[in-house]
Amino acid sequence: MSTTSSLAWGILGTGSIANTFAEGLTHSRTGRLVAVGSRELASAKEFAAKQGGVKAHGSYDELLADSDVQAVYISTPHPLHAEWSVKAARAGKHILCEKPLTLNHAEALVVAEEVRTHGVFLMEAFMYRCHPQTARIVELIQGGAIGEVGVVQATFSFKSDFDAGSRLFANALGGGGILDVGCYAMSIARLVAGAAQGRAFFDPLRVTGMARLHPETGTDLYALATAEFDGGVLAQLAAGVNLKQDTGLRVFGSGGSIHVPTPFVFSREGGKSTIHLQREEKAAEAIVIDCPHYLYALEADAVGDAIAAGLKESPCMPVADSLGNMRALDEWRASADLVYESEKS
């Protein structure tokens, strides 16, 4: 694959997150959007017009066949991630795939093998991993700011009205809180548990979960899980797409605690966020992270920088980390009796 000083991106899909990523790309220092692909040409043309007239393709296959496209951002519903990641790898395109990487761990293994075989880059699009606030959280924990970590509490939950056909609830679209936002909670718990042991991430020894499943779709409206990690770290996780809860991260250690009110979604246009640090017998500290960069530009640049350095994965979100997260989410769903119809066949 040819390389240039500016990575040429194609976006596969034209949904709301695709528009968000496209906006971020306009502020990227490493890449630019050159094409978009949709299952309907009219949709691709409408999207392309809003992005300054980039090339519009009336199918995903046409986008992958475009020789000007070096990297693709896959923004389809969850069940299509594996199929189009595999096809992108076989087309020789570098891949940034929306979270969760696939529907389950078995599919993730297939994708990981395909990118290895074809020598392309792969990163799961957890944009929060590319933000300096996340790096600061890891730095505090590894530096012993709160002593030995004991408990991690991570929640990502919001209320959306039930719609059986929506991607948030439909069984055929991999709906439910565990995959849509529980993946964030599991991801950051694994990150913190790893940081506590001087590692990039840790996989849980066991995950036990439960969920409120909708009787019509069988997908989870909201869900809870506990995870146990080596080193004595326990995690309490909560997720939901039909119940508003207090989204945030709390980490409790032998010498204090950390509270992060916005651990996942920061201002898309850049701005300030705060980490609240409470050390034993000391005044509370508010650590302000001032990041002027667009959130999704940081994600695109993490990909661009890694590819420019000749890497096949990003230290922000390694492939092994994504595989471990998918395995843990499988355990959560299994414990909550959530199996998608497509998995049964």
Image (cartoon, rainbow, N blue to C red):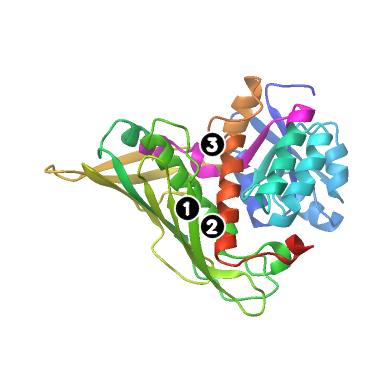
Precedes in sequence: disc 2 or disc 3: 2
Q: Are the residues tagged 3 and 1 within 8 Å (C-beta)?
A: no
Q: Are the residues tagged 1 and 2 within 8 Å (C-beta)?
A: yes
Q: Which residue is mark 2?
A: 181
Relative to 62, is 213 above or below? Answer: below
Precedes in sequence: disc 3 or disc 1: 1
Give me the residue at 21% from left, 41% from top: 255
Q: Nearer the viewer, residue 127 or 121?
A: 121
Q: Position of residue 82 (x, y in %)?
A: 74, 47
Relative to 280, is 39 above or below? Answer: below
Give me the residue at 54% from left, 36% from top: 298
The residue under label 3 is which amino acid type? Answer: Leu
Indicate yes or no whether the magenta region holds residue 8.
no
Q: Which residues are magenta?
A: 116-137
Q: Which residue is mark 1?
A: 185
Give the class, few, some or many, for how many residues have Cα within 10 Å of label 1's Cα (few <14, many ≥20). many
Q: Position of residue 175 (x, y in %)?
A: 64, 65
**Label tally:** 3
